[in-house]
Image: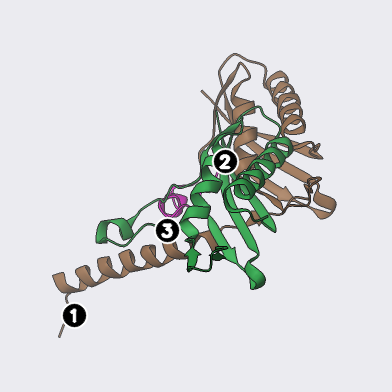
Amino acid sequence: MKIVPTLGLIFNVIIFVLLVIFIINILNPYLIPNIQNRLQPKLDLGLVKIDRNAIASIAAIAAMEIEGVKQISQPRKIFIIFELVEFKRTAIDVELKKDDELVLDIPLIIKYGFSAYDVAEQVRENVKKTVEKMLNKTPREVNIIICGIE
Amino acid sequence: MDVHSKIDLGYVKIHKDVLSSIAATAAMEVEGVKQIYNKTGLDIGELIGIRSIKRILVDFGKNDEISIEIPIIVKYGYNIPEIAEHAQENIRSAIEKMLDKTPKEININIRGIEK
């Protein structure tokens, strides 16, 4: 006796996956991890929370402004599944240490012919400047990893 | 939420959706706010026919205290604390003007940044 996977089994699996995605979609506002930043406004009307993805996209836009940066290297293929359900995993790591100190890790792919050291230095300065301007907070470390050259 | 009128002819009921749409339009007036975050990745609920999930959470606690939580996408280059403060003030004044009630809490979640 061999157990052969029939069409019914495949349909069951598909329906199960759709159900799981639907349930995660409903619970979504409660699942996304938030950084609770200490930005207390003067009126005491409530909190202001800043998402990890927001800080990551600030760093991404600031890094792409520099001449010589080809792109920011993509996350692994597995995380595409999470992207469907809105758990966006950007390649940039944002860590929040004690006393709200920010540490950013940026993986880069640079163009052929540019000095890697100069590009890294410029990217670091620009990211630091824009994060200061937008969040009123200086990141403690901006680490840059050069993943490739194209 | 119930609002009693002065003539005692009955009561006026206000739905949560009214508050959330007031908050959304007041937040969009602030300069630097790109849009209200409402993207749902795979919206299977809409395909089946269930209404999509509300992103602006409105709560009435005891004694009709209003608390609102609103997710926002900000434009690149603006200062986030200033924008959040402006949005809170604007939402509070709009609700005070339209409903004669001061909200207790207005929490703002910044979900993303776009150019």
The residue wearing badge 3 is B53
Give coordinates of residue B4: x percent, y percent. Answer: 56, 66
Gap in Å between the C-alphas at discs 1 and 3?
42 Å
Chain B tint as drawn:
green
Badge 3 vs badge 2, beta-carbon distance below 8 Å: no
**Magenta region, residue range:** A76-92
The residue tagged with tag 1: helix, strand or loop? loop
Q: Residue at x 50, y 45 (%)?
A: B37
User: Which numbered disc covers residue B26?
Assistant: 2
Display colour scheme: by chain
Give coordinates of residue A58: x percent, y percent. Answer: 63, 34
User: Which numbered disc covers residue A102?
Assistant: none
**Residue B85 part of the magenta segment:** no
**Residue type, mark 3 in image:** Ile
Gap in Å between the C-alphas at discs 3 and 2?
21 Å
Neighbor class of circle 3 (other Cα within 10 Å; few <14, some 14-19, many 20+) is: some
